[in-house]
């Protein structure tokens, strides 16, 4: 078919018929623009009729196929959204309280501050900023992955991992699907007790096919396919970027600290009653409402792998849980 | 212009988008739920058409409405609410498409969407549109060809044809001049038209065999 219809931006802007035609193509069959444009095409007023006819036909077919990929939210989608909004609103209502307290602090109520912070930590109010500076001195659980797992930890997930020589996958198969596996605490942390989980990852080689994650979950019912739990706060590295995923939205937030090869990173997730802080090598990556339920919390590391198994591109060197 | 606090006592169901948004700006969740009811299908369908990936639609869709509620105070009348909402949706979809390129492995959440099976298959859509078998083939072919269009042409067709947005709205959402959008619409449909032309020739060939 010959290329005879004028199509540059300038020609479109200058030609009233092309303006009418493009209006008609957007508005579609049934619109006044459509009737006018089609009438002029059918009358042969404008030229190469066969090509215009195909344009019109293409647009008619699209109108007929308007249901293509039309999806509606299900009940679960709506429930989840409004639950997130409720959490968001509750968090927002707490902010003015923090602001006024900070103004009191500025006025010199230093002594009272200690009490207020303690109150926040126990009541879960306005705690984010303080969490990052809390000192967690007591080791509740720890493993350095140099020998068999000590009490308080267990492996999980379809991806078999070796916890005795630095945590790494030992699965030897090949898979196009993502498989996950790792180590999780068997002892739960109380929702009312602030704690910190810390892990050190050694990155030999960065790859999209192996994703290390550090997580805190309030529902340790790990998927048999992926080893992912349904409600968890996650830090991960995929590609060269560090990300955070929240329990409710499951949407990854990219954080601006790239990872480089042959480097160790120590990540800390500090969890309060309602809020959490995620730090990488001492730098705060993310802070906000953790979206974790007020239920017992379990911590762990996981490797998500695709492609070939057994490799040492990412190794977890240590994992520990600290309390105040 | 009406102030945010100056609300008419109209029944919520009949209130305009902009009135509902003013109420949302004052923290009225009921008003927001009506806006959600009006726009959820449109937003989710746009995401499905653009991303073509059901797994992403749910998480991005959640984020769109969560942001719409959270950032409601940034909405300024007289901008059309649909324009404001689709600007948020488009930005998140673009971010997700970029992220997807870097990170194809993703935690998949449960799917809470309705109609995915039926509406995602072009042949099923075509069968519902007409009883004419020849026309059904043509429609299905067109819908499949839509996915192969360059993304800028596909975008203007999805926004303009499927979401019924005007060129002026698309200009605001995409930051691209209306004349360029018209040109993309024209070229996109011309490509789709050629698919039909090729199909006619192909069918002719088969008939003569």
Image (tube, helix red, strand yellow):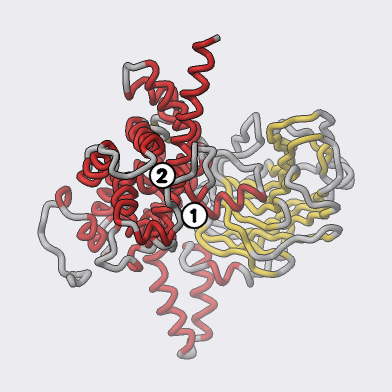
Q: Dividing the image into 4 quarters, which one contains the N terminus of chain B? A: bottom left
Q: Residues within 10 Å of mark 1 (few under 14, many from 20)?
A: some
Which numbered disc, 2 or 1, marks the residue that appears first in the sequence?
1
Q: Which residue is mark 1?
A: B92
| In this rendering, position of residue A107 left or right of residue B30 | right
Q: Nearer the viewer, residue A233 or A50?
A: A50
Residue at 36% across / 43% down in the picture? A47
Front label number (2 vs 1): 2
Does residue A177 appear in the picture of this structure? yes
Q: Position of residue A299 (x, y in %)?
A: 66, 48
What secondary structure is marked by label 2? helix
Q: Is residue A268 above or below residue B12?
A: below
Name the side, left or right, on which A64 lies relative to A305.
left
Tally the marks.
2
Give the SS element for disc 1: helix
Instruction: Estimate how packed mark 2 is, as few (under 14), some (14 to 19) or many (20 or more) residues with alpha carbons within 10 Å.
Output: many
Residue at point 45%, 90% (across, down): A107
Residue at 27%, 39% in the rendered image: A38
């Amino acid at each position: 078919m010959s290329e005879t219809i004028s199509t540059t931006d300038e020609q479109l802007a200058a030609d009233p018929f092309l303006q009418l035609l493009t209006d008609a193509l957007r508005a579609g069959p049934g619109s006044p623009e459509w009737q006018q444009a089609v009438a002029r095409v059918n009358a042969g007023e404008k030229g190469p009729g066969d090509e215009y006819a195909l344009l019109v036909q293409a647009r008619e077919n699209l109108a007929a196929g308007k249901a293509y990929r039309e999806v509606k939210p299900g009940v679960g989608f709506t429930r989840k959204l409004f639950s997130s909004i409720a959490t968001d609103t509750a968090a927002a209502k707490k902010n003015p309280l923090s602001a006024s307290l900070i103004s009191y602090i500025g006025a010199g109520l230093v002594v009272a501050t200690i009490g207020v912070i303690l109150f926040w930590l126990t009541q879960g109010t306005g705690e984010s900023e303080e969490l990052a500076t809390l000192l967690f001195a007591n080791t509740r659980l720890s493993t350095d992955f140099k020998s068999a797992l000590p009490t308080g930890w267990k492996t999980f997930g379809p991806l078999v991992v070796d916890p005795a020589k630095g945590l790494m996958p030992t699965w030897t198969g090949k898979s196009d699907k993502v498989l996950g596996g790792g180590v999780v605490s068997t002892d739960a942390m109380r929702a009312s007790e602030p704690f910190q989980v810390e892990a050190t990852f050694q990155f030999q080689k960065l790859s999209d096919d192996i994703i290390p994650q550090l997580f805190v979950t309030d529902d340790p019912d790990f998927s048999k396919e992926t080893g992912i739990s349904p409600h968890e706060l996650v830090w991960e590295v995929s590609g060269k970027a560090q990300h955070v995923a929240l329990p409710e939205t499951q949407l990854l937030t990219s954080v601006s600290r790239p990872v480089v090869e042959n480097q160790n990173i120590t990540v800390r997730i500090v969890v309060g009653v309602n809020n959490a802080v995620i730090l990488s090598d001492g730098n705060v990556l993310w802070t906000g409402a953790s979206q974790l339920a007020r239920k017992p919390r379990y911590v762990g590391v996981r490797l998500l792998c695709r492609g070939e198994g057994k490799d040492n591109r990412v190794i977890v060197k240590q994992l520990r849980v600290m309390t105040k | 212009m009406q102030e945010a606090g100056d609300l008419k006592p109209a029944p919520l169901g009949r209130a305009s988008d902009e009135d509902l948004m003013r109420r949302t700006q004052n923290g009225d969740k009921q008003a927001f739920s009506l806006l959600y009811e009006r726009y959820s299908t449109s937003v989710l369908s746009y995401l499905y058409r653009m991303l073509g990936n059901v797994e992403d639609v749910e998480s991005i869709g959640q984020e769109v409405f969560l942001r719409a509620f959270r950032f409601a105070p940034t909405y300024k009348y007289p901008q059309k609410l649909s324009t404001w909402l689709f600007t948020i949706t488009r930005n998140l979809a673009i971010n997700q498409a970029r992220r997807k390129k870097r990170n194809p492995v993703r935690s998949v959440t449960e799917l809470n969407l309705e109609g995915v099976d039926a509406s995602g298959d072009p042949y099923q859509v075509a069968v519902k549109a007409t009883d004419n078998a020849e026309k059904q083939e043509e429609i299905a072919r067109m819908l499949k060809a839509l996915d192969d269009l360059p993304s800028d042409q596909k975008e203007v067709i999805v926004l303009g044809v499927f979401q019924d947005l005007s060129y002026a709205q698309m200009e605001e959402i995409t930051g691209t001049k209306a004349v360029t959008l018209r040109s993309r619409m024209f070229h996109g449909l011309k490509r789709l038209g050629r698919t039909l032309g090729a199909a006619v020739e192909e069918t002719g060939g088969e008939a003569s065999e």
